[in-house]
Amino acid sequence: MTESLEYSALLRLIDERSAAFRSAVAAAPGLDAPVPSCPEWTVFDLLQHLGTGQRWWAAIVAAGPAEAPPAKDAAEAPRELEALLAWYAESNELLLSALREAGPERECWTWWSAGVSPANAWGVARRRVHELLVHTYDAQLAAGAVQPMPVDVAVDGVAEFLDTCNSTPVAWPHEPATIQYHATEGRSWLLVLDGTGAWPAPLTEDSAPASVSATGTAEQLLLFVWGRLTMDDLKIEGDRQVFEQIIAWEPEE
């Protein structure tokens, strides 16, 4: 697993990114405004998705080790802006309270337990930071005022996506391949795809040439792996079909 942020820093970032998210929602033209990066979603849909997610993960962390997650809260968020923002702030505090009480090592159910990221409160906190980071971008895009992401958080976001979303023991269904990601800030990552699954690996001077590589800022790379940017937004070298294959791949455990 790559170097990443300390637990206390993750909790602070959840709070900071949530504040930035609420500010973007408040600045949007309205709750019915479309979110360009999330087709068919409105600002209300985006906020309800994120707030419901904070509440669900709070319950997951509080439950501790489990074979399955608790049911999601089916209640719909309020439709009036001030009440909706208060509901979201409460959702976020529920998550932070659960994470503080649990501590980083408490195990819990996660959908990524077969991959590299740990199935514990630390892994949840890290995932929620980057969920917030990207959805804050979505909300800012809807408001027409996108702000640069903190570079160190975007860097960790690329690593976290590989650790959590691109690591699996499910066999890669295509020819073995490797992907390299190069951030212009000086960080690089390697993803190996073969019959054993998909696994992040150290990228060294001795690493073989990649099947395909993508170069951009850490923010651009993060938005690319999250589906907000396309290959046309980055410098791509090698077999572009590998990116098309991994974007379309939905491994089933």
Image (tube, helix red, strand yellow):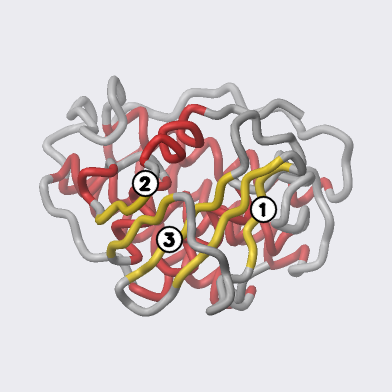
- The front one of 97 and 103 is 103
Give amino acid for label 1.
Trp
| Mark earlier in primary sequence (2, 3) | 2
On residue 248, the disc is: none
Helix, strand or loop at disc 1?
strand
Answer with left or right where residue 97 lies relative to residue 40. Answer: right
Q: Quadrant of the N terminus?
A: bottom right
- The front one of 213 and 225 is 213
Give amino acid for label 3.
Tyr
| Numbered disc in front, either 2 or 3 | 3
**Circle 3 sits on which residue?**
181
**Considering only vertical position in the picture, is 177 above or below 172?**
below
**Circle 2 sits on which residue?**
135
Does the residue at mark 2 contact the one at mark 1 (Cβ under 8 Å)? no
| Residue 118, horizontal then vertical, whole percent | 75, 58
Does the residue at mark 1 contact the one at mark 3 (Cβ under 8 Å)? no
Does the residue at mark 2 contact the one at mark 3 (Cβ under 8 Å)? no
User: In percent of the image, x 50 and y 59: which residue is there?
Assistant: 129
Query: Could you say which quadrant of the image residue 53 lies in?
Result: top right
Answer with left or right where residue 116 lies relative to residue 2. Answer: right
Q: Quadrant of the C terminus?
A: top right
On residue 199, the disc is: 1
| Mark earlier in primary sequence (2, 1) | 2
User: In percent of the image, x 46 and y 34: which residue is there?
Assistant: 247
Mark 1–mark 3 Cα distance, whole angstroms, equals 14 Å
User: In percent of the image, x 21 and y 49: which residue is there?
Assistant: 233
User: Neighbour class for label 2 at 10 Å: few (<14), some, many (≥20)?
Assistant: many
